[in-house]
Image (cartoon, grey):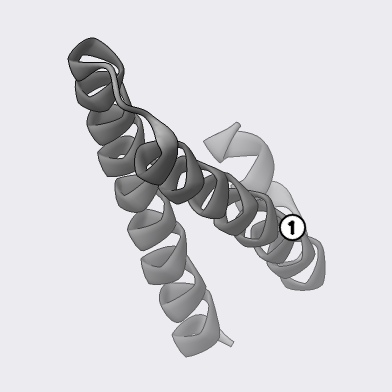
Amino acid sequence: MRQKQADAPPDTRKQQLMEDLRRTKCALDQAYSNFENVVDPDLIDCSIYELKAVQMRYRFLLKQAELLEKAT
């Protein structure tokens, strides 16, 4: 996937990145909602791991967007 993105024109890469950010933001909202609504200890742990993973992905995508903006 990285190779494909590196060869794509900047506008296409930016559109794809924005779409990934939008989807990840939705996933982040859902992860927060899940965390707030679970009561079983095992599900709480699961929700925490899921939330942390989505947060890390969102941060990564934001950094990629910053790099793309600096490159253009």
**In the image shown, does 51 or 21 lie closer to the viewer?**
51
Left or right side of 28 for 41: left
Residue 53 image point, x, y percent:
32, 37
Left or right side of 17 for 64: left
- Farthest-out residue, front: 39
The amino acid type found where label 1 is placed reads Glu
Q: How many marks?
A: 1
**In the image shown, does 2 or 54 lie closer to the viewer?**
54
**In the image shown, does 24 or 29 lie closer to the viewer?**
29
Compared to 61, does 48 lie above or below?
above
Q: Quadrant of the N terminus?
A: top right
Residue 48 image point, x, y percent:
24, 34
Q: Which residue is mark 1?
A: 19
What is the quadrant of residue 14 in the picture?
bottom right
Identify the residue at image location x=65%, y=47%: 5
Left or right side of 16 for 6: left
What is the quadrant of residue 41 in the picture?
top left
Identify the residue at image location x=78%, y=65%: 15
Residue 21 image point, x, y percent:
60, 60
**In the image shown, does 46 or 65 lie closer to the viewer?**
46
- Farthest-out residue, top: 42
Q: Crowding near pointer 1: few (<14 within 10 Å), some, many (20+)?
A: few
Identify the residue at image location x=59%, y=87%: 72
Compared to 8, does 15 lie above or below?
below
Residue 2 image point, x, y percent:
54, 38
Secondary structure at badge 1 equals helix
